[in-house]
Image (cartoon, rainbow, N blue to C red):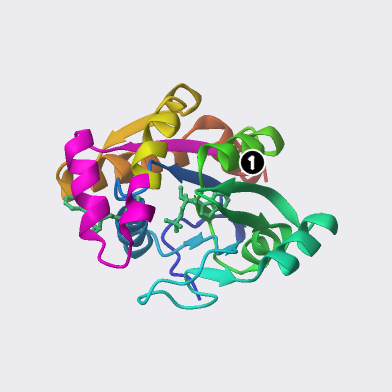
Amino acid sequence: MFSQDTTWYADGVMVDPFLLLILSSPSGAGKTTLTRKLQERFPALRFSVSHTTRKPRSNENHARDYHFIDRKDFDELVEREAFVEWAEVHGNCYGTSHAEIERARSEPGCAGMIFDIDYQGARQIRAKQPDAVAVFILPPSMIELERRLRGRASETEDVVKRRFEAAKVEIEHYGFFDYLVVNDDVDTAFNHLEGIVLAERSRRFRRADLAERLLRAGKL
Ligand code: ADP
Ligand code: 5GP
């Protein structure tokens, strides 16, 4: 159950803007770290659990971090059009299922979703949901990015190299995103993200329904 940190009532009707928040970054820039902090701060935002063919890391749990499946099952889901978006990233397949979004939308008190996906997925989601908010996390430097990739002890040298080389291609897509957040000091980066969520929730089109309901209530 979600805490009601975003719920407003007009005439006893819940008026909650549903926020789709996409977080992308080169691997190692700190997306997972920041996503966890965002979830603590905004429990009404549900983390979208993707499907992947990547093997789980030692600290990862099935269905909490990812739905870990093999390539055959992934291909079947693609065939059945079960994904809102999917892409091949660093040699593995990743996808967001329609079911994941529908589940969140039907959960009482759920005010939106956080998608930790790459730029290809961000593009596909935005094609279907143009009001999704897209944030790109930047590392403070490439040296620091490499240090963080190596610091994640679960990765082999080959994986670190492959992900570091891919970082430039990913950063080249920064122009697609609404916001760029630099993750140098993690608390500062988090403050920026928090500000983005609060501001986006207050956008006129997300609050217009409440305003209209208030006007109608005032006429009674
Ligand atoms: P991503 O999800 O983008 O691949 P992670 O959140 O897993 O990145 O972070 C990669 C590594 O960098 C982790 O070991 C994490 O603890 C560390 N890290 C994340 N943010 C910072 C930061 N601001 N300063 C130093 N280390 C960080
Ligand atoms: P990791 O293997 O480090 O968990 O993730 C590798 C990359 O895949 C990250 O850039 C992450 O954002 C991306 N990713 C994770 N899930 C999805 C997804 O469902 N769709 C897409 N397109 N990318 C994803």
Asked if residue 148 lies in the magenta stretch, the reply is yes
> At 63% across and 55% down in the image, what residue appears?
95
- In the displayed image of the protein, which residue is found farthest to the left? 185
137 above or below 88?
A: above
Left or right of 180? Residue 130 is right
Which residue is painted at 23% across and 35% down in the image? 142
Q: Is residue 97 above or below residue 217?
A: below
x and y percentages locating residue 179 in the rendered image? 39, 30
Is residue 159 visible to the viewer in this orientation of the structure?
A: yes
> Can residue 17 be seen from the camera position used here?
no
The span picked out in magenta is 132-161
Classify the position of ligand 1 by quadrant: top left, top right, bottom left or bottom right. bottom left
Question: x and y percent of residue 164 in the render?
Answer: 34, 42
Q: Secondary structure at mark 1?
A: helix
Name the residue: 43% across, 24% down: 172
Q: Is residue 129 left or right of residue 117?
A: right
Residue indicated by mark 1:
125
Instruction: Return the x and y of residue 10 as percentages of the image width and height.
Output: 58, 52
Specify the amino acid type for callout 1: Ile
Determine crowd level at label 1: few under 14, some 14-19, many 20+ residues with C-alpha closer than 10 A.
many
* Residue 42 sits inside the magenta stretch: no
In the figure, is residue 9 to the left or right of 58?
right
